[in-house]
Amino acid sequence: MEIIRHELQRPSVFIDEAKLSIDYVPPNLPHREEHLRKLTQLFRGVIETPGRVSQKVLIVGDTGSGKTSVTKLFGKLLSEVARNHGFNLVYVHVNARRERTEYMILNKILSAFQPGIPLRGLSTQELLSIILEYIESNNLYLLVTLDELGVFLKRRGEELLYLLSRTVDDKLNAQQRISLIGISRSPLFGYILDPSTWSTLQKNMLRFNRYNSRQLRDILNFRIKEAVLEGAVSSSTIDLIADIAGASGDARYALEVLYKAGKVADEKGVLRILPEYVRSAKAFITPEIRREVLLDLSTHRILLLLAVCRLLKASEDAYITTGELEARYGLVCEEYAQTSRSHTQIWSYIQDLVGLGVLSSKLSSVGQRGNTTLVSLPDIPASVLENELELLLEKRKVGVRT
């Protein structure tokens, strides 16, 4: 108790570290005003003639380019505007990478406006019917954002998108109550969709370019005012973070480096975030593998990734074969008292991890190592990722055999 009390009484460089969280959406988003303007133009008909039209929009761009923050802020503001126009529009943001099935996504949507309904034993179609009946009887309208849509569609196909976008096809002059926004890093999943759905999304596609160093500096300055003690971050330190993150154009990466550097300052008992703390923070973060991606991985995907790390650490080759990986994964499962999955399931895990950007893969050259699929890590050192994964397994209390 005394240790905790002492630590909580120590001064901190932060005034509100939650303002640097990936889940926090600030009231202003520097350099994304034009995207908010374009979204408003696309949804003008939804506001001015509720029920007459719905809308489908696709947002694409690299990680950390502001897609999620802009969409969440837009959903919040659009709901407020709808109330001023005399009708209720509910905004629901679903991470389709985290909610892995159609049922889980529909459950997430329903729980946003009708929590507490026991839903076990229902089919996907029954769950959708409950949603439609509820919004109809309560005269509600929905704007649903499916974040990481491309990852979900590649894994599950287009059934969910079809269900949500065709809810009133069999009714004459029915109220159009559900609008959709899809967020993806790339539009290359288009081949999965039926031509009419893909045609609509292509017409309403917004692209988010990467931030440059100057724009990242503006974003950092804005967040620092909300999150950090006044005067704790010098302009040269901000420039350093902006230049580091400028190579990837990733605002999340810039904010994560700032947060980690602040934690280094707290650990040292210093009320300033110095450039050296920034360099220390950067050494343990890479823009290619985001913290939230690792947190969302299932236990067996983590075990498979841990096997990749251990193989690459001990190898002079940049890539390993899937056969080598499967064998090492079995040993890691045994170490953590888990039953290893089938060959087909392991292959599915590999595809998922490649789709998330956590792994890279390629086919070997003819005659090279049996002409098979090879996998590697994009950029992060295997030892650094190995440590992160072991900590995750420890936090989840995944058992270790002694």
Image (tube, grey):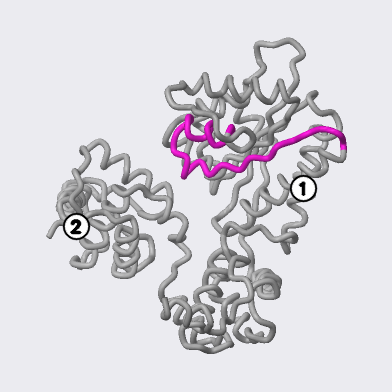
Compared to residue 323, the image places residue 315 above or below, namely below
Residue in view at x 29 percent, y 69 percent: 383
- Front-most of residues 297 and 248: 297
Residue in view at x 51 percent, y 41 percent: 96
For label 1, the crowd category at 10 Å Cα-Cα, with few meaning under 14, some 14 to 19 and many 20 or more, is: some
Residue denoted by label 2: 400
Residue 71 drawn at (x, y percent): 67, 48
Compared to residue 122, the image places residue 45 above or below, namely below
Compared to residue 272, the image places residue 164 above or below, namely above
Toward which corner of the image does residue 134 lie, by quadrant?
A: top right
Residue 400 drawn at (x, y percent): 19, 57
Compared to residue 120, the image places residue 220 above or below, namely below
Residue in view at x 75 percent, y 20 percent: 175
Read off the magenta span. 85-110
Q: Is residue 57 left or right of residue 37?
A: left
Residue denoted by label 1: 77
Three-letter amino acid code at the position of disc 2: Val
User: Magenta span has 387?
Assistant: no
> The N terminus appears in which quarter of the rendering?
bottom left
Toward which corner of the image does residue 81 lie, by quadrant?
A: top right
Three-letter amino acid code at the position of disc 1: Leu
Residue in view at x 56 percent, y 81 percent: 12
